[in-house]
Image (cartoon, rainbow, N blue to C red):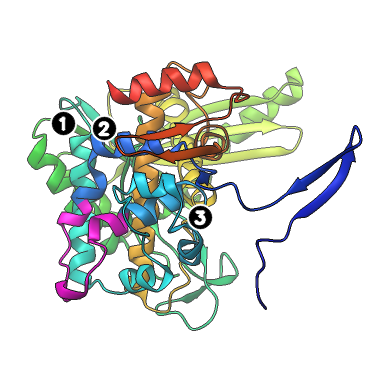
Amino acid sequence: MTKNTKQMMLFKAISHKKVVVDFNGGDTTSDAGLLFLREIEKKTGIIDRIANALDDRRHQGYVKHDLTQLLRQRVYQIAAGYEDANDSNHLRNDPILQIACDKIDAPLASQPTISRLENMFSRKDLYRIAEAFVDAFLASYKKAPEAIILDIDDTPDPTHGKQQLSFFNAYHGSYCFMPIHIYEGKTGKLITTILRTGKRPSGEEIAMILKRIIRKIKQAWPNVGIIIRGDSHYAGPHVFDLCNEDDLFFILGLTGWAPLKRNVEPLVKKAKALFQEKGKPVKLFTEFEYQAASWNAPQRVICKVEYNEKGSNIRFIVTDLVNSRIKMIYQTIYCGRGAMELMIKEHKNHLGSDRTSCNRFYANQFRLFLHSMAYVLLHAFRELCLKNTQFATAQFDTIRLKILKIGARVIRLATKIKIHLPSSNPYQDELMDIWRACIT
């Protein structure tokens, strides 16, 4: 079917005047806010860092787009809401995307070039990218922090068709991948993301991933305190032993096995009696030592018992923190991991990181890294440039809608490029503040 963009679109008249629309506006864009991300990318250097970790095996005599430019194009498209590689065909002539990619004299890459990029890297390349993400995380601090929290969790990534290492997960009821996300719990900074099969990771695999990350962190910050925080399926002897060997702390959820519930039966009865007496929800805490058959030593277990009109709600955590009150450990430290759900939501829902639809597993891992680069950029943008604005705590989709998605007209002159933003933009003062923060 032939597309005819010369035909005019007629809409209902207003005040006896025709409303006519065509596609003859010249060099215009709907994503002028990418200029802000370009400034942040120059500061963080995340894309250059990833590009330097890769081997470009292409014949250089046929190369029109270097790796850095290809990565920038793909990551900026993701940040702007174009998570599909097919979008490159329509955006390769977008004037603002060209400026963001430092290439204004020729079109950007098309979809076939982007698809070849996603399929060209080996397992060794992907390992170096994962290490580069940790290096970028370390470089994001001006000085070594006293302590950090490693929040670790996985999330279902449904698959379709015959994709390598796609397994059925009975808990989620679908074929999927289960990528592991690791963030710094206090700041929300991404440390790395690892694509996995749909099966739940073993304790040995979890310990192996954490050990490599911790080794790099300790090399850069020998005196930093590290707390590992995660859900119940990360609590096991391999993680306990890792923390004991490397002088780390952990606070992890714990499955409510029958022996644990028997230990807190008196507390449940007490909570029920208090609820019946006062008619208000009751929350009680207790602690005890417990050693499962597979554990090498007993561990400190903290239990929270809630009782309300719906009955009892019992939760357990296990930790090696010793000098803290049990209520503070549970409510402040452990429950703080709820913020990680928002981080994964931004990564997965707002940036479309579950678009792992390639056949090759390594290509899907690389796609996950592309979306992770977009996360690093947007998180740094919010942290560095939006902190004194009404968008200081905005989610990525709000940042995209109100800051990145700005229509503009681009005029290329001999000595400059002029970009005209709409005079009716409702956030002109905020955009000026954001600009000042970006360039300082």
Of the two numbered discs 2 and 3 on the same chain, state the one appearing first in sequence: 3
The question of residue 105 being in magenta is answered with no
Mark whose residue sits in front, 2 or 3 = 3
Residues at discs 2 and 1 in contact (Cβ within 8 Å): yes
Q: Amino acid at mark 3?
A: Tyr
Q: Is residue 270 left or right of residue 411?
A: right
Residues at discs 2 and 3 in contact (Cβ within 8 Å): no
Horizontal and vertical percent position of residue 339: 47, 35
Residue underneath mark 3? 82
Horizontal and vertical percent position of residue 107: 37, 60
Residue underneath mark 1? 224
> For residue 424, what is the image quadrant?
top right
- Mark 2: few/some/many CA within 10 Å (<14, 14-19, 20+): some
Which of these two is toward me, 421 or 297? 421
Of the two numbered discs 3 and 1 on the same chain, state the one appearing first in sequence: 3
Q: CA distance from mark 2 to mark 1?
A: 7 Å
